[in-house]
Amino acid sequence: PGVDDALIQCAYYLYGGPGYDSVKHNLFEDPDSLLAYAYSHLAAAYAYSGNSAEAFYKVSPAVVEHLMGVYASVCAQPMPPAGFEAFVYNEADGSTQSFLGWNYIPAGTLEIIKVSGNPAMTDGNSCYSLAGAVFDVYNSGNQKIGSITTDSSGRGKLEGIEPGTGFYIVEVTPPKGFALSKDRPVFTIVSGETTSVPVKNMPQNYPVGILLRKQDADT
């Protein structure tokens, strides 16, 4: 990654960051010690400066080798999730010390739960399926932020949504055998939580029943 990406990853994955618990035992023998805290600062200093002589001043070669391994391990991790921001206080000018800080507001998740408006007609009937319903998801500014397709259980998710209010969904493709829902449910996304939105579709006419009635009428 670039220097900026590496610094963001250090803020997220090193000591004190939201992602530290997921990697700490791969980085340090005693990940909750003050030594791990100090080493994390040194690795972040290298990510910021890109200068090992400056970041690891008077650090032994063995420790430098370990720190470079820590840095490489952190850089190999995925970029932090949406909602994580890192920033630097006091950009170094030779007379002040720089500080790395971060802010994290975990994104939320939307789950759509598709249900039949007449389960007595549709449950166990191969003419109907809850799979394949497609919904477009919009924010309060009427901007499309993603789409969801339901699975065989009628469920589908969209992750990584910035928390807020006034979101809504529009069904653009109904599942097999069902009429298109014209409802536009409005919902709120809460940081770090999953918002479930049920959507009911009414089944269209039962095709086999129609065919049988037609045959009876013809005979």
Image (cartoon, rainbow, N blue to C red):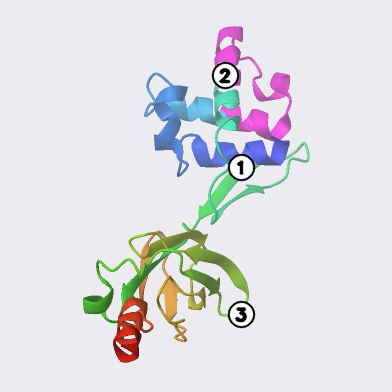
Q: Earlier in the sequence, mark 3 or mark 2?
A: 2
Amino acid type assigned to the residue bearing label 3 in the image: Gly
Give the residue pinned by disc 3: 141
Residue 89 within the magenta-colored segment of the rendering: no
Query: Could you tell me residue 88's position as x and y percent?
Result: 65, 47
Quadrant where the C terminus sits is bottom left
Figure quadrant of residue 56: top right
Gap in angstroms between the C-alphas marked 3 and 2: 45 Å
Query: Could you tell me residue 79's position as x and y percent?
Result: 58, 42
Question: Which of the two residues, 1 or 95, is positioned nearer the viewer here?
Answer: 1
Q: Secondary structure at mark 1?
A: helix
The residue under the point 29% across, 87% down is 216
Mark 1: few/some/many CA within 10 Å (<14, 14-19, 20+): many
Q: Earlier in the sequence, mark 3 or mark 1?
A: 1
First to last magenta residue range: 42-68
193 on left or right of 171: left
Residue 8: mark: 1
Specify whether residue 53 is in view. yes
